Amino acid sequence: MFSVSLEYSKTFTSLLRYVSVQTAMLNVAEKRAIQNPRSSTQIPETRNLLLTMPGYINADKCRALACKVVTVFPDNYKNNLPSILANILLFNEKTGTLDAIMDGTEITLWRTAAASVIATKYIRGSHKKNNILAIVGAGAQAKMHVVAFQQKFKFEKVHIWNRTHEKAGNLCKELDFSVFGQYVAFKNLNECIEQADVIVTATFATTPLIKYEWLKAGVHINAVGAGGTPMELDEETYKSSVVFV
């Protein structure tokens, strides 16, 4: 089973620093990388997906041709398996030969959390007070986001909500022993997010969870989502917000 500990915080600050993800994003923005839209193959009559994400980078210090292959099986928890599994294929950019196959599951978790940290840092701004972080979801992405955000921002309180309240409570107990902050599990989603300065939604929801009327002015939301048709925020939230993709 995947568990969060201080060792993962050390990983975030050394091997998989958010600065590396920031550099990769900058390369994409400056046209030094090619990142085509991901393709999705869904198994009929299920929510199970195969996602492929190819990319090429032609930066000064790095040239790489790679493809990440991800499976999303939301019911894997029933088999005591992660819902999201990933492998990264690294090819020789001159010959096309396969140089390496890397387990991409943990890399994906950290990259996604790092992207949210970067978005929060530059869009919300690092000068604002960090009182409450609200996490919607209690899976692996939720865990990684808490560790990453607390390493970077150190919110005083972390609110966690999950459809299964017991999972939110268990995550709070786990994090309380290893990661900075006060942790509270909520049964009511509205109460969880209404005073939050930053919200992270990391669920498999296909219908809106977050209502605009629940949000306080100026809140920053990182809508992570997962699967083929993620839909965690209601239409009014999108209409009333400045949206960055």
Image (tube, rainbow, N blue to C red):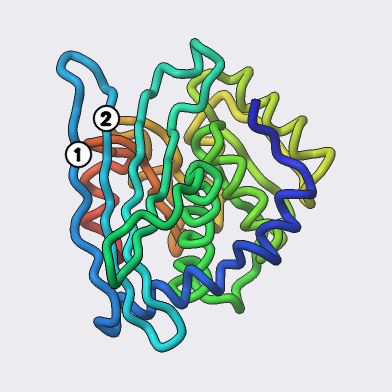
Residue closest to the eye, 95 or 52: 95
Q: Are marks 1 and 2 in contact (CB under 8 Å)?
A: yes
- Give the mark nearer the N terminus: 1 vs 2: 1
In the figure, is residue 83 to the left or right of 39?
A: right
> From the image, which quarter does the C terminus lie in?
bottom left
**For residue 40, which numbered disc appears in the image?**
1
Judged from the image, the secondary structure of the residue bearing numbered disc 2 is strand
Q: Residue at point 17% right, 14% down?
A: 45
**Residue beneath disc 2:** 49
- Label 2 Cα neighbours within 10 Å, binned few <14 / some 14-19 / many ≥20: some
Q: Is residue 10 visible?
A: yes
- Residue furthest bottom in the image: 60
Residue pictured at 45% horizontal, 18% vertical: 76
Give the answer, above or below, for where 175 lies relative to 74: below
Q: Residue at x 55, y 53 (%)?
A: 110
Asked if residue 243 can be seen in this view, the reply is no
Amino acid tagged 2: Leu
Q: In the displayed structure, does residue 123 sit left or right of residue 130?
A: left
Secondary structure of the residue carrying tag 1 is strand
Residue 138 spot, x, y in % from top left:
56, 32
Q: Nearer the viewer, residue 102 or 173?
A: 102
114 or 170: nearer the viewer? 114
* Residue 127: x %, y % from top left: 61, 78
